[in-house]
Amino acid sequence: IWLNLCQYLFFHRQEILKWNGWGYSDTRFLFNKKGQAEFTGKRYRLSGMIIPALQNWFEGTFGASVQHKSPAMPILTSSAVQPPTLNEAFVDELKSTGIPCSHDAEDRVFRGHGHCLHEVFALREGKVGRVPDIVVWPNCHNDVVKIVELACKHNVCLIPYGGGTSVSSALECPPEETRCIVSLDTSQMNRILWIDEKNLTAHVEAGIVGQELERLLNESGYCTGHEPDSMEFSSLGGWVATRASGMKKNIYGNIEDLVVHVKMVTPQGVIEKGCQCPRMSTGPDIHHFIMGSEGTLGVVTEVTMKIRPMPEYQKYGSVVFPNFEQGVACLREVAKQRCAPASIRLMDNEQFKFGHALKPQVSSIFTSFLDGLKKFYITKFKGFDPDRLCVATLLFEGDREKVLQHEKQVYDIAAKFGGLAAGEDNGQRGYMLTFVIAYLRDLGMDYYVIGESFETSVPWDRVLDICRNVKARIIQECKDKGVQFSPLSTCRVTQTYDAGACVYFYFAFNYRGLSDPVHVYEQVEHAAREEILANGGSLSHHHGVGKLRKEWMRETISDVGMGMLKSVKNYVDPKNIFGNRNLI
Amino acid sequence: IDPMLKKRDDFEDILEERRNSSDLKYALRCYTPVLYKGVTPCTSSMLKSMVLQSDQLHYVINQVSKETGKATDDIKEEASAILEEMAQCLQLSTVRFFAFTLSKAFKTLFRSICVNEDGIQRLQQAIQEHPVVLLPSHRSYMDFLLMSYILYTYDVALPVIAAGMDFMGMKFVGEMLRMSGAFFIRRSFGGDKLYWALFSEYVKTMLKNGFAPVEFFLEGTRSRTSKSLTPKLGLLNIVMDPFLKGEVFDVNVVPVSISYERVLEETLYARELLGIPKPKESTSGLFKARKILSEDYGSIHVYFGQPVSVRSLAQGKVNRCQFNLVPRHIPRRPSEDIASFVNDSAYRLVRAQEENMVLKPWVLVASLLLQYHHQNQAAGQKRGIALGELTAQAVWLRDLSRQYGAFLHWPDHIPPSEVVSSSLTLHRGLVRICEDKVQLAVEQGPHSSVAPEEELLSQAVILLSCASYRNQALHVFVRPALLALAIHTASSNQKQEVFNSFSFLRNMFSNEFILCPGATVQDFEEACYLLVKTGALQFTQQEVLVTERGHRTLAFLSTMLDPFLQGYQVVCRFLCEEATETLTEKQFIPAVRKFIKKLLLAGRLRYMEVLSSDLQKNSLAALLRLGAVRKMKG
């Protein structure tokens, strides 16, 4: 019985999640026999629906064809996986603690990657590089303490694993690592340990996944309000380790604003503060050594987080602007007046068109008539150029009266910049797409299209320049690198701050005719990041550095900054037990 | 790369159509140029208010107000007035007027105006993709009217042109030019922050918005000597700034080479260089120039070069992150890497202009005639050279210059003797042919009623005019010529000795010729390559050897630089012998001129060219740069 239970726990993830793509196994986009796009499964609002315009958009945008398939390898052949390098003494002692572990090939492969394009592309081709040699599932903080002690004793390499949604090569095993690599999977540490309603905090184990945390808190009438786009799969510990940001940060704050107390197990022992105070003046905040440490110093095991009563009322909205410049000017003004709704995002024209292509088939003639009328009104009556207009999606949250008041304030500002309210539906669809958009990459990869998104943060005066230049750089680099088809190069502003904004770029191209598409992709992304930095953007707003962006750390934080981080690492983990080699 | 392999486009004569169809129709035809894809449509007056409302200007106005105590409103008014004085107001109607009148004038003056249409196509493409900067060479007042005329002809977006303030002296003409796209800059505004801010912001605004291609002259002023001038960096700095600060994705710079078979201002320039006072630029003066209209000025070749992407120029040379830490609207002195990047780029662009300059056979003939003139003079002969011999020499030089990669327009289907004679005919003011002997038109007349100094000057006018044609070919020969001179002056044939001597001469003459800073080794290698390839030199492990046939080439090449060498020597002599007390900059030219005249009249100098104030200024600048002379304030 014990064995069966364990097996259930271990294989839990692979059963419902894809091993070589994004998200749930039952959920994917596909082109059906009629060539129409379909979204399978039952989990999302779009699930089970036909998306009539997608094929046209897809073929038109990428020069791809639904006739030209590039299917993935359906199953993993275990011969592709190198046999594990096991540290027998470590394994023996580990087993004696009773903490579950496995060196099954599937378990190891599943935890040996994040979701960077090159990682997923390789998996689809059935190629597996260096993966962890053993996976261990601690059940609580004390289990982690034991594991870290054993790792130090036997000199094995530990790589913490939360939700596996990294897009910075952070989970990739360093190929030069010769020691036994142990993947420390926190998924079993997924309980809310207590809720403190007086102080509005919750003490939570770090392995809990975002949507589970919200669901459990909602049961008690609370929420954290932390909703990164990956919240279905990403874990609390991962958020802390990467300095995550949530869609609704305008109300609830980013992870650094939400965390009250953190417990992290390091080779030197456990680090935590001695109280749960809202703010302290006690030297540099040790939380800031932990947050963003990307698994190089230890494992986050427990976190006390701020919670809020669930909002009484939510309302979506959208605004259409004649062009992107006006849209950015509006967002800037909203930020200046500090009246940003829970979420405000501005898509450029290409994304607006893309969003349109993702409209599901409508059942009633009336709705589509209304759509037609709306389109007419926007493009003809108002004189908006359909090839220049762009749209902002909004989410308001709070008590009803204030939401309506807030809404009016924002729409009034938008009007000053030529913005035209475009309805709740458009807004809601925009946010729904946030979760399904990640599935689209897999569809693209089935038809010779590869792509990825990456983000940055940038001062307000640079927003337009960075958007224009990075998009243009992507197009130019694709041309220079021999990409035969013009790429999709688009962006959106996803967060506003007092002093700047967060910008997301989406980039994809048809790779037919290229011998090494992933290499080309990486060169273009590299160039795009150089362009971002040259235009005053940051190395990352919330994805983190991992190994993908390490090369730019020195210029990002200066030599002394690097020295500081390195000396902390040297003190906390002199034997490099946490050897994922991220960040520095 | 072998210079022989340089590929250049073919030319098309745009006057041909003008001679066969109505000028009026042409001036009134539909004009619909392709614009920059990111253009923000705006008028000339909107541009001005954009400039006045820019962050840059606000910042500088506040700064000036703090420094001077003047009210910001007063400074704003001042700014507005400066901008009025500066701004262009491009109007199609004026351009049409010019299209009509210039058609008439050009047809009378010139045989043809040849343009490389492929270059125009590339320009069209560039204008659509990125903000464009046009950089024509500057040899004549006509240059920018000619440019606009050509662009109008090909339906290309008309440029806005940075022009010197001196044009504004001619009221009517100034306003006409303004309406054809010229904007006016004061010649010097050293420390005037407000003026600088207005000017740079005005240029940048036009560039960034894609209002029009921005045109200016990298050489800053018309070259009176037909040599390319050391590039001025101010405007180039300004137009590169939007790229460096990320305000545009890229800027395309298009070098344009305009070569005149006969320069309109030919003798004017010579007189200017000799210090014979020039008439002030005035409208009436321009009309007096009507007699010019009766003469034949041959043809013009205009070559639109390959657009150069500033982004690719800057690749790996400039770290654009340096602008991340200070708001971009706060004016800052360019950092060292940017200053040297802009300087290097400027030299590259001037060389690109030079490379695409069309050389006419006359340029070679003039070079030969000058050398003959001085040799004969030294030998006391006054008989000129037989046409046949001159032709043979010219053919030799033709082949040599082609091997050096010159863009030579020598009609190969016509017998060389005819080519040479027709060159002589076109430039009959400078040469004399009698009894089949050719010589420069400088022989002393029997009428000795003229004062010897006046006589000297009138001879010098002819010589300097001739030299200006020879100068057109200098960029082809300068590197091998420096090597030839280096071999001549080096104490031994040792490679290292020769290189040292080359390096010294190159350094000495780097105010005189376009020699990219820091490229001594490349220049040396290029010179060696050319001389070895043409069989004039051989290299052993250690030594440089002149071949049998190489002597002629090397003699020709080093003689070419002789006047310059003598010029620098005589300036040094002047400074040693005469300028015992400190000398103001203003006094320098008249004093050195007087000194040289004396030597020339005494027959102690060979080259009248040393009378050229350009040469004198350059040598002083070189001596200053090398630390032989010191500049003192006050």
Image: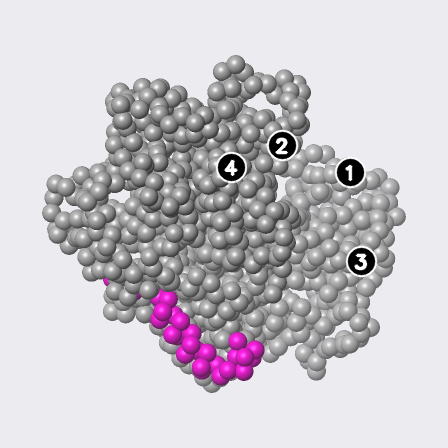
Q: Local crowd at mark 2 within 10 Å, few (<14), some, or many (≥20)?
A: many
| Stretch in magenta | B64-92
Above or below, A24 against B541 in this view is below
Q: Secondary structure at mark 2?
A: helix
- Left or right of A20? Residue A415 is left
Question: Mark number for residue B604?
Answer: 4
Q: Amino acid at mark 4?
A: Arg
Q: Amino acid at mark 2?
A: Ser
Q: Secondary structure at mark 1?
A: loop
Given the image, what chain letter belongs to the residue carrying mark 1? A
Residue at coordinates 33% horizontally, 64% vertically from top-left? B168
- Point out residue A25 in the picture as x, y percentages from the top left corner: 53, 49
Q: Local crowd at mark 1 within 10 Å, few (<14), some, or many (≥20)?
A: few
Q: CA distance from mark 2 to mark 4?
A: 27 Å
Residue that label 2 marks: B501
Please report contact status of discs 4 and 3: CB closer than 8 Å, yes or no: no
Q: Are marks 1 and 4 on the same chain?
A: no
Q: Amino acid at mark 3?
A: Val
Q: Local crowd at mark 4 within 10 Å, few (<14), some, or many (≥20)?
A: few
> Sequence order check: which comes first, mark 3 or mark 1?
1
- Left or right of B481? Residue B421 is left
Q: Local crowd at mark 3 within 10 Å, few (<14), some, or many (≥20)?
A: some
Label 3 or label 1, whichever lies nearer to me, is 3
Front-most of B27 and B614? B614
Residue that label 3 marks: A568
Q: CA distance from mark 4 to mark 3?
A: 80 Å
Residue at coordinates 73% horizontally, 48% vertically from top-left? A581
Residue that label 1 marks: A178
